[in-house]
């Protein structure tokens, strides 16, 4: 324990509560705080300055502007096209009807202590019916069953898609990986998540922003130079930030390359069902799994079940086919490592909304209900993109791939200076790389967005 310095011992002779002779603050209503060794005083100051998260900072700026607007300090109503979240015409993100109905039942069961764990912890990997239900929707019933029967599939709950990516990184690091390759561009947080798990994050070419299309040839020739066993991150569908989608043929070509070169596929699926269809959105994942390519997959329900603040997701590992036909032992070893990573991080996952989704996924009628709720949102997001493309094109503003069914995002060819001016002068908030969330566009704001963007575009 640190020695007390004499000048700081004893009550203040000022008789003034809260400060001593040297001006140090006192604690506990008058007893003197010790002067600590410099190492302790300076401890937290040794942390580096960190650049704040671009998306959450953008949301903060939008909220501040919105508060100013409500207080009458700002004439223009701010429009938020930043964070990836669906909002209806009135700017709300309602619960999906199917999810809301099941939540009521589950809440009653929980209150009555009628859940199978009776309010106790879930297993480390999570709630079984949710995990299996997720495997079935992701891989399709037949393939999921086949992979399970051959001890080649292992899944756990994850804290949303972010938590799923974090577990991917943790597992890759435990398997001895030193680096991971991500697309250029990619969701900014990929760099931070995989970096946080100790991997060095490298980049591969992916998108040409001038033509708004995937550079498949460049990507393939780059990836073909990587060493066997290198993990490569792939967006399963609806690429963030570009909205790009790979075709069935492109997935075939890519998976052949992975098989040939022995690369490890690290899939991220945060928008399944927001593209052409759920099955097409999972086509890449299923193609890779059918070819026996080693895979880690993060799957998020945040957007596709409107459960943004509930952190519902999963992470699956697909083992390659073993030459001697048995994977049971290897699966146990991988499971032990996955459990060790989770136990040391958050011990075990939350239960309420996982039970809600678990019930939905395992009941054909409820599953159809959720699929149709999800489709309505997917359609509205698509419609938002088309509406904005109409308004942009009428004014001569480039519309990029806004007309394509590719999930929530489009990256528009605005310079960082234009994006800045669109925000500060016109109060339309988007990411610095020109990424916009189509899920926040609707018939009440599309024309207004185009009018405001035009003011800057036309300068
Ligand atoms: N991956 C990608 C590509 C994403 O766009 C997002 C959300 N922006 C996530 C993962 C994280 O999803 P969640 O909110 O479920 O953590």
Image: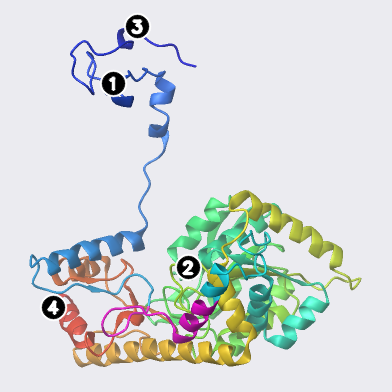
Say whether disc 3 or disc 2 marks the residue closer to the N-terminus: 3
CA distance for labels 3 and 4: 67 Å
CA distance for labels 1 and 4: 60 Å
Q: Is residue 69 left or right of residue 291?
A: left
Residue 164: where, in percent of width, then height?
57, 65
Q: Which class describes the residues within 10 Å of circle 2: few (<14), some (14-19), or many (20+)?
A: some
Q: Is residue 291 left or right of residue 208?
A: right
Residue holding disc 2: 310
Residue holding disc 1: 30
Q: What is the basis of the colouring in this image?
A: rainbow
Name the residue nearer the viewer: 226 or 451: 451
Q: Which class describes the residues within 10 Å of circle 3: few (<14), some (14-19), or many (20+)?
A: few
Q: Residue at x 43, y 23 (%)?
A: 39
Residue 153 lies in quadrant = bottom right
Name the residue nearer the viewer: 280 or 87: 87
Say whether disc 1 or disc 4 marks the residue closer to the N-terminus: 1
* Region of the chain picked out in magenta, as a range: 86-105
Q: Secondary structure at mark 2?
A: loop
Residue 300: where, in percent of width, then height?
53, 72
Q: Residue at x 46, y 15 (%)?
A: 2
CA distance for labels 2 and 1: 43 Å
Name the residue nearer the viewer: 204 or 272: 272
Camera-nearest label, 1 or 4? 1
In the picture, the disc for residue 6 is 3
In the picture, the disc for residue 416 is none
Decide if residue 234 is in sight here.
no
């Amino acid at each position: 324990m640190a020695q007390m310095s004499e000048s700081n011992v004893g009550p203040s002779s000022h008789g003034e509560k809260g400060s001593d002779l040297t001006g140090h603050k006192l604690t506990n209503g008058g007893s003197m705080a010790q002067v600590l060794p410099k190492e302790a005083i300076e401890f937290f100051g040794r942390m580096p300055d960190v650049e704040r998260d671009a998306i959450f900072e953008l949301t903060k700026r939008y909220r501040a502007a919105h508060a100013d607007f409500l207080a009458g300090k700002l004439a223009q109503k701010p429009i938020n096209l930043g964070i990836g979240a669906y909002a209806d015409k009135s700017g709300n993100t309602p619960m999906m009807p199917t999810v809301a109905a099941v939540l009521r039942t589950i809440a009653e069961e929980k209150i009555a202590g009628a859940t199978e764990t009776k309010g106790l912890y879930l297993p480390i990997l999570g709630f079984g019916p949710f995990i299996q239900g997720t495997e079935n929707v992701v891989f399709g019933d037949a393939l999921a069953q086949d992979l399970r029967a051959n001890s080649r599939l292992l899944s756990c709950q994850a804290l949303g898609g972010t938590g799923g990516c974090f577990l991917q990184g943790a597992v890759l690091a435990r398997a001895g990986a030193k680096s991971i390759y991500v697309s250029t561009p990619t969701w900014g947080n990929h760099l931070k998540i995989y970096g946080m798990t100790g991997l060095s994050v490298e980049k591969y070419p992916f998108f040409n922003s001038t033509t708004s299309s995937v550079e498949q040839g460049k990507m393939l020739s780059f990836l073909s130079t990587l060493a066997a066993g290198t993990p490569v991150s792939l967006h399963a569908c609806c690429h963030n930030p570009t909205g790009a989608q790979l075709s069935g043929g492109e997935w075939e070509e890519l998976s052949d390359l992975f098989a040939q070169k022995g690369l490890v596929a690290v899939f991220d699926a945060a928008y399944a069902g927001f593209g052409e269809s759920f099955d097409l959105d999972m086509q890449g994942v299923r193609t890779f799994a059918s070819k026996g390519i080693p895979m880690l997959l993060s799957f998020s329900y945040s957007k596709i079940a409107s459960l943004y603040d509930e952190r519902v997701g999963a992470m699956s590992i697909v083992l390659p086919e073993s030459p001697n036909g048995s994977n049971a032992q290897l699966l146990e070893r991988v499971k032990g490592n996955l459990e060790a990573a989770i136990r040391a991080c958050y011990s075990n996952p939350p239960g309420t909304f996982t039970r809600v989704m678990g019930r939905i996924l395992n009941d054909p009628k409820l599953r159809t209900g959720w699929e149709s709720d999800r489709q309505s949102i997917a359609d509205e997001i698509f419609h938002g993109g088309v509406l904005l493309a109409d308004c942009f094109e009428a004014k001569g503003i480039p519309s990029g791939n806004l007309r394509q069914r590719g999930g929530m995002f489009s990256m528009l060819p605005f310079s960082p200076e234009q994006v800045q001016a669109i925000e500060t002068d016109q109060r339309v908030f988007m990411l610095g790389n020109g990424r916009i969330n189509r899920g926040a566009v609707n018939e009440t704001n599309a024309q207004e967005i185009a009018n405001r963007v035009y003011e800057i575009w036309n300068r």
